[in-house]
Amino acid sequence: MFSTILLSYDGSDHAQNALKAAAGLAKALNADLHLSHTPQIDTPTIVAGPFVSALEKPPTDEEVVEAGRHVVDQAKVLAAKAGVEFKECHVGRGRPAQHTLADAEAIGADLIVMGRRGLGAVGALAMGSVSQAVSHGAKCACMTVV
């Protein structure tokens, strides 16, 4: 049924649940499991006023890479606990939905598994913007996990 599964992972609770589901499917179906991660670091902010003045620098490339490495390492540990290994880990920059869709296309994924909501600022939405965009743009089956 599914031979190549792509997990879109951001480290959130929903993503960790998605990892467990993807790992279970990969084991049961003897499918290849890939990971897609796009580090998201807060954008710079400026605060100014009569008593406050601060400029927050954007993260360096090294900080973004390190943040991404930490999340991927966490996912590898959780996958190992579930009894699977990732065939490949794809780490990109930019918009997570576009990166996930590009990874799915590149590896020929027939299933994308992702958390329903991620680390975005608006956690109250029924479905996160990344999972919505991926579900809308994917050329394969998608599974969202709570």
Image: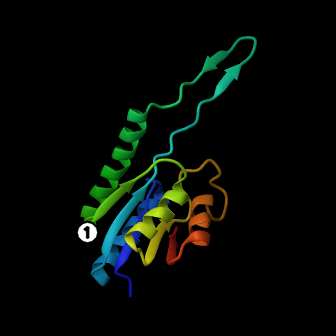
Disc 1 element: loop
* Residue 35 point in image, percent of width and height: 37, 62
Q: Is 109 positioned to the left or the right of 121 in the image?
A: left
* Residue 47 point in image, percent of width and height: 68, 22
Q: Which residue is mark 1?
A: 84
The N terminus lies in which quarter of the figure? bottom left
Outermost residue, bottom side: 1
Residue depicted at x 53% and y 76%:
139
* Residue 99 point in image, percent of width and height: 49, 57
Outermost residue, right side: 50
Classed neighbour count for the residue bearing mark 1: other residues with Cα under 10 Å, few (<14), some (14–19), many (≥20): some
* Residue 73 point in image, percent of width and height: 30, 50
Quadrant for residue 69, please give it: top left
Q: Is residue 7 above or below residue 1?
A: above
Residue depicted at x 33% and y 58%:
89
Outermost residue, front side: 106
Colour theme: rainbow
Q: Is 63 positioned to the left or the right of 138 in the image?
A: left
Quadrant for residue 130, please give it: bottom right
Residue depicted at x 39% and y 65%:
19
Q: Nearer the viewer, residue 35 or 21?
A: 35
Q: Is 63 positioned to the left or the right of 43 in the image?
A: left
Q: Amino acid at mark 1?
A: Val
Q: Nearer the viewer, residue 103 or 89?
A: 103
Q: Is residue 116 above or below residue 62?
A: below
Q: Nearer the viewer, residue 5 or 102?
A: 102
Q: Is residue 56 above or below residue 108?
A: above
Residue depicted at x 54% and y 59%:
98
Outermost residue, top side: 51
